[in-house]
Amino acid sequence: MHDELRRQVLDASHDLAARALAHASFGNVSAVDRDAGVVAIKPSGVACAELRAEDVSLVSLDDGTVLDGLKPSSDTPTHLALYEAFGAIDGIAHTHSTYATSWAQALRPLPCLGTTHADYFNGDVPCTRALHDDECGDGYERATGDVIVETLDGRDPLEVPAVLVASHGAFAWGISAAEAVEHAAALEEVAHLAFNAVALAPVEPVSAALLDRHFGRKHGPTAYYGQR
Amino acid sequence: MHDELRRQVLDASHDLAARALAHASFGNVSAVDRDAGVVAIKPSGVACAELRAEDVSLVSLDDGTVLDGLKPSSDTPTHLALYEAFGAIDGIAHTHSTYATSWAQALRPLPCLGTTHADYFNGDVPCTRALHDDECGDGYERATGDVIVETLDGRDPLEVPAVLVASHGAFAWGISAAEAVEHAAALEEVAHLAFNAVALAPVEPVSAALLDRHFGRKHGPTAYYGQR
Amino acid sequence: MHDELRRQVLDASHDLAARALAHASFGNVSAVDRDAGVVAIKPSGVACAELRAEDVSLVSLDDGTVLDGLKPSSDTPTHLALYEAFGAIDGIAHTHSTYATSWAQALRPLPCLGTTHADYFNGDVPCTRALHDDECGDGYERATGDVIVETLDGRDPLEVPAVLVASHGAFAWGISAAEAVEHAAALEEVAHLAFNAVALAPVEPVSAALLDRHFGRKHGPTAYYGQR
Amino acid sequence: MHDELRRQVLDASHDLAARALAHASFGNVSAVDRDAGVVAIKPSGVACAELRAEDVSLVSLDDGTVLDGLKPSSDTPTHLALYEAFGAIDGIAHTHSTYATSWAQALRPLPCLGTTHADYFNGDVPCTRALHDDECGDGYERATGDVIVETLDGRDPLEVPAVLVASHGAFAWGISAAEAVEHAAALEEVAHLAFNAVALAPVEPVSAALLDRHFGRKHGPTAYYGQR
């Protein structure tokens, strides 16, 4: 059942572990087949590195009903909320990667301080507000998704393919599970660069002109980077 | 003699080394068989990575008498004090891991700044007071155990499965040697996250609601994380 | 065609990746054959680690016309500007390596704080000014090269074989692609040392006497380091 | 000639590289046979990782005359000055390891902030004064050795088996080349711990009682650590 979708989640999960973005059983990956209305997602409590194809969970896109595989990640409602709100994304990666999580724990958005950042994110990567106490109840994971959507505040999710969740970690996404992992990896790297930079000087974000140049080199009609 | 107990200490010691939590011959692991009144522990001066099954030391739980194997870790009296005070724990790991030890050297308790922390520790990980001069004499290692117990101050050792020892390092524990190592690894990771976070902003601990949600997701009657 | 030149770029690109100086597809290397008027350079969007000999791009030194191989790096005009201005260099390496880029994002030149630095760089490694908005248009990559030349300000490029590009990363060079990578690696290491040192104390550059001693040990007529 | 002495330097040099304490061709190791009046030392410009037994340099202890092997390390006069002043040491390791060098570049002695430090060093690891301009001339490497001796200021070199050289790096020593490398590795680790600790809090050195306890556990007549 949905072998290709499962394979995407399997490969992306292994990639997340290989890039040292997922400690212990933290971190998970999902992919959606919107035509079939099915989401494949890492099972709960299974380390990304040890995931096997047959264990990948399948749930329905509309209400999260488990269709096959092991019990899905407890973060499944967060993923579903993002797929619902962001129609252009087909893959999600969640990490507690060290530097991205450090900014999230400091409750600070990640400013765009350089071209490495601008190559992937069209401006700052925002950080959610803290969840209210009544959002930490039974609907906690759904509320996490909702606050990510609230935080993106209408910006294009493919131009800002990640959000920091306050006191928690990062959610990144893309047009596939593989791209979501790539964005999670880029986020960790630019979070490290920015951590170091602000330790060296009180520094302002790059100019709009430089941001446009670099984001535009790689994205949209003006792109000229790569073998296309 | 007590092959299974020795095997637990052997495997956990190798795991401690493989996770880069034990430099040189620092770090040690023990496990207790309470029915038999026997503790297995790493021998003194042997690197965790190079430990062999037959070298694991066996000592009596009540007074530390050596029963078999090499000369036990010089920290054995610390382990015995913890087993005596905390009846629910059956494994202990001691490390000088980099970030946990940095907080211990700074004499600062490790605040709960995020959900990664809250998944393992129900609140801050406390740091002991400095030992008094008269506690640095012949009974030094026993005094180290006693000050850990004093520092936990009646909190449930399975809800706070680690303590920072001032100017020294970390002791972590659990229901087995393997779990003790897992807690030592989690402690190092959250110590790193917190080190970075406080460099970025003066940050407060997470709300009680978020702490309860995450600790409760994984522990006790409300747990719903993992394949159970 | 120009197999030896391509081989240099291939080997140096793999070396850049092996030293963890090039994340994702960031980073590129070139080498010039000035007699033939040909530059070999990494193709656009190809990861350094995965580069193959037949994919290395060949372009003309004078105007960048593509002669063979895949589409060249989008940074090619930067490389050509440097070869044009610095007649003594025959290889260039560009990185977003973590610590060098951190200083570049902080817009700070890298001061010479120790002999490790002085062994490679005869004084500080300067940081360019930010590019003006009108330099971020179509001629952006050429402008990047020009501002590097402007920043070197007449200093000998073989005595200061690297420049930090503000909000971007590092360009390093040498008498060959291999030496350019060696300089990029040295830059990253001394950028890390300096990052740590300024966190520990407000520290001044080393004395001219110590700088002269160390740079002179390895370079020019007074050199006595190594097997020569 | 002196195969065993060469073997010690060879093994210790490889160990220094394997522990990531020697970048590029930085770092060197020597060992002395005092009865024969011969010092074996890494050759100049050869990376520790690539050293071969037949290339190890042999020089005379009294005046540095080259006896066999490649041209010796340019730091040979520093090593000879230390062997001359410290009769109890038979091996030396020199590194530019990251954290030790960071303290050296900050011109700060490394305070004893914890038991990891106290297990190896009986108090702070001092940092030399900056060399005067006239010490940076032809006798520079000898002056480096002399300032290390001056800095130790009569303390027992086996109780303080390392010194930070201002704006340069670390020299460590011991009763053998292997022990010198072990001390260089311990220095790097405790320099990292102390770097982190002082970032977290303004922290005082440990008490004399705790220092005595830990240093005495491993050294001298009171030692009870290890399998002895």
Image (cartoon, coloured by chain):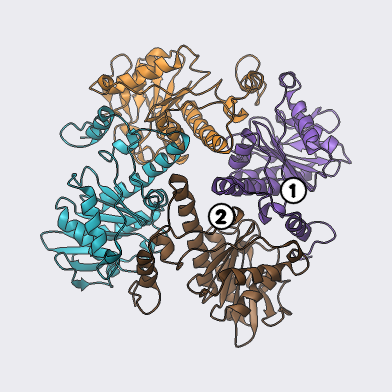
Chain colours: A cyan, B brown, C orange, D purple
What is the three-letter code of the residue carrying label 2? Answer: Trp
The residue that mark 2 highlights is B103
Q: Quadrant of the N terminus of chain D?
A: top right
Chain identity of mark 2 = B
At x 65% / y 32%, what residue is drawn? D168
Residue D123 numbered tag:
1
Q: SS for tag 2?
A: helix
Residue B212 numbered tag:
none
Q: Image check: C132 left or right of C183?
A: left
Q: Image check: B81 left or right of D91?
A: left
Viewer-closest of A200 and D57: A200
> Compared with residue B204, is residue D74 higher up or lower down, i.e. above or below?
above
- Residue A160, percent across and down? 24, 44
Rate crowding at label 2 as few (under 14), some (14 to 19) or many (20 or more) other CA atoms within 10 Å.
Answer: many
- Residue C79, percent across and down? 36, 22
Chain identity of mark 1 = D
- Answer yes or no: do the residues labelled 1 and 2 have beta carbons within 8 Å? no
Instruction: For marks 1 and 2, give the CA distance.
Output: 20 Å
Q: In the image, are marks 1 and 2 on the same chain?
A: no
At x 27% / y 41%, what residue is drawn? A121
At x 27% / y 23%, what residue is drawn? C136
Q: Quadrant of the C terminus of chain D?
A: bottom right
Q: Image check: D71 left or right of A11?
A: right
Quarter holding residue B37 = bottom right
- Residue C1, percent across and down? 33, 24
Q: Does residue C98 appear anywhere in the picture? A: no
Q: Image check: D119 left or right of C220?
A: right
As drawn, which residue projects farthest toward the left?
Answer: A35
Q: Does residue D114 appear anywhere in the picture? A: yes
